[in-house]
Amino acid sequence: MKAYLLPVLLFGMFMPAWAQEEEDMLKQLGEDEPKKEYVFNAFKSSRVIMSHSMEMLRPGVLDFRILHRFGRFNGGVQELFGLDGPATVRLGLDYGITNFLSIGVGRSTVNKELDGFIKLRPIQQATGPRSSPVSVVVTGGSTLFTTKWSDPARENFFSSRIAYYGQLIIGRKFSEGVTLQVMPTMVHLNMVPLKNDNNDIYAAGIGGRIKLSKRISINADYYYVVNQNTSTPAKNPLSIGFDIETGGHVFQLHFTNAKGMNEKAFLTQTEYDWGKGDIMFGFNISRAFQIGKKKR
Amino acid sequence: MINKVMIAAVLICAATVTQAQDRYFTKSGRIEFFSKAPMEDIEARNKTVAAVLDTKSGALQFSVLMKSFEFEKALMQEHFNENYVESNKFPKAEFKGSITNNGDINYAKDGSYTAKVKGKLTIHGVTRDVETTGTIKVASGKIDASSVFNILLSDYNISIPAIVKDKISNSIKIAVDCKLEPLK
């Protein structure tokens, strides 16, 4: 009788030690409450290609941006498919003041134009309790062309050189690989060529990306300009390209019909037409420097 | 008779199950890591490490959220999460193991003891056996557990692209420091 109970006793003594090996002790600390977690890295950089993206610079980051567009692709081999030029450039500096506020300035070859903007993100996409499914970003900027007046004899006002733009960006990173955003935009031109031209131009934009690998994504952005002035027959701008990130740098290699590299320029002065093969090869180089030290 | 023996067996079972008082924990432990490479030094720290130590059996467990590693440069933090450890896919790193010389450590007496630790470390979805030594400091009912060891990124399927080979070392030094309190 006792002999048969012994195994039971032995088993009883050893079992707990064995059971413990498999135990997840961390469970005793209790489940972590679901936390609100903000969504980052919706895009590799702060621009889709032409447009501002829903992504912001991190605080203390200075982003030196070199934007370059070659000549028209349909220039053929004689022009080396546009690589011979005429090329245009915009050099710009953007700075992240806080997680939700950035500023930037730039200067473009086209019209020798200066531009500056403020970009604000009142709502950031997040997961967890009380979170927003989308990011909402507001940008406002102005441009100033500095070319000589075409008609110096006329009474020219400094204010005529200025244009403004305002943009609302609503975007969502649907998954690690897919981000989409819409950008209703308004441009106000202080001066227009003809009396009957609109000073206020409205456009609806869409942009997005699909990640092909950890460091490469395919991006595109497009605007439908609602009330383009007939005196300046501008086309709707479309850019398609790749983002290649190499730690520190983001290269945006793309094809576009927009020579202009600020909102006013690409929305109201895009002469080229994709349909006619008036496409340019272009690249944006973004080099980020950490200027401000992060608080520990 | 049979019933009495059975009851005794059950009681012994119950008695051997480790009591919670033998366990020490923290939710604010620290883990830092360092990478020394010709071009750049990388350093990050995490102050929200969860850890439990069972002083009776020597069982030891850590868990850490990858996203709460803080870097000095925002861009490094971004790349760490997005390109290297893929925090969305593998949100946590975990260690599950035990102190093999637990018998040599007197948790009731203040002092500093060398602990040999063996177990399984999971980073980036890859689990590897690790073995290292650490220090257990006992002082007025609290335990300070610390250890420094190296891991190879290649062991955990974390690849470094050729273009940044000079900036990131394959060997990463990890320092753990947890101040544990009794778990009630």
Image (spheres, coloured by chain):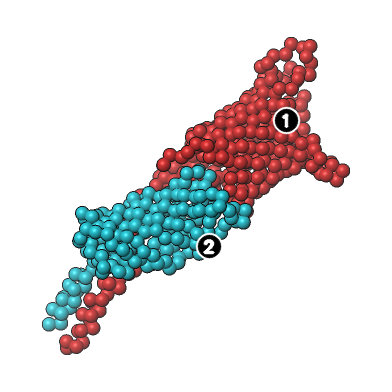
The crowd level at tag 2 (other Cα within 10 Å; few <14, some 14-19, many 20+) is few
Q: Is residue B31 left or right of residue A289?
A: left
Q: Which element carries disc 1, helix, strand or loop?
A: loop
Q: Which mark is residue B129?
A: none
Residue B120's x, y, as percent?
41, 66
Q: Residue furthest right?
A: A78
Q: Amino acid at mark 1?
A: Thr
- Residue tagged by mark 1? A109
Q: Colour of chain B?
A: cyan
Q: Amino acid at mark 2?
A: Ser
- Residue tagged by mark 2? B154
The residue under the point 56% across, 52% down is: B38
State the quadrant of the C terminus of chain A. top left
Q: Is residue A163 left or right of residue A279?
A: left
Most foreground residue, A197 or B69? B69
Most foreground residue, B77 or A292? A292
* Mark 1 vs mark 2: in front: 2
Residue B119's x, y, as percent?
38, 67
Residue A10's x, y, as percent?
23, 80
The residue under the point 46% across, 49% down is: B43
The crowd level at tag 1 (other Cα within 10 Å; few <14, some 14-19, many 20+) is some
- Name which quarter of the figure residue A148 lies in: top right
State the red chain.
A
- Name which quarter of the figure residue A140 lies in: top right
The chain letter under disc 1 is A
The residue under the point 23% across, 55% down is: B139
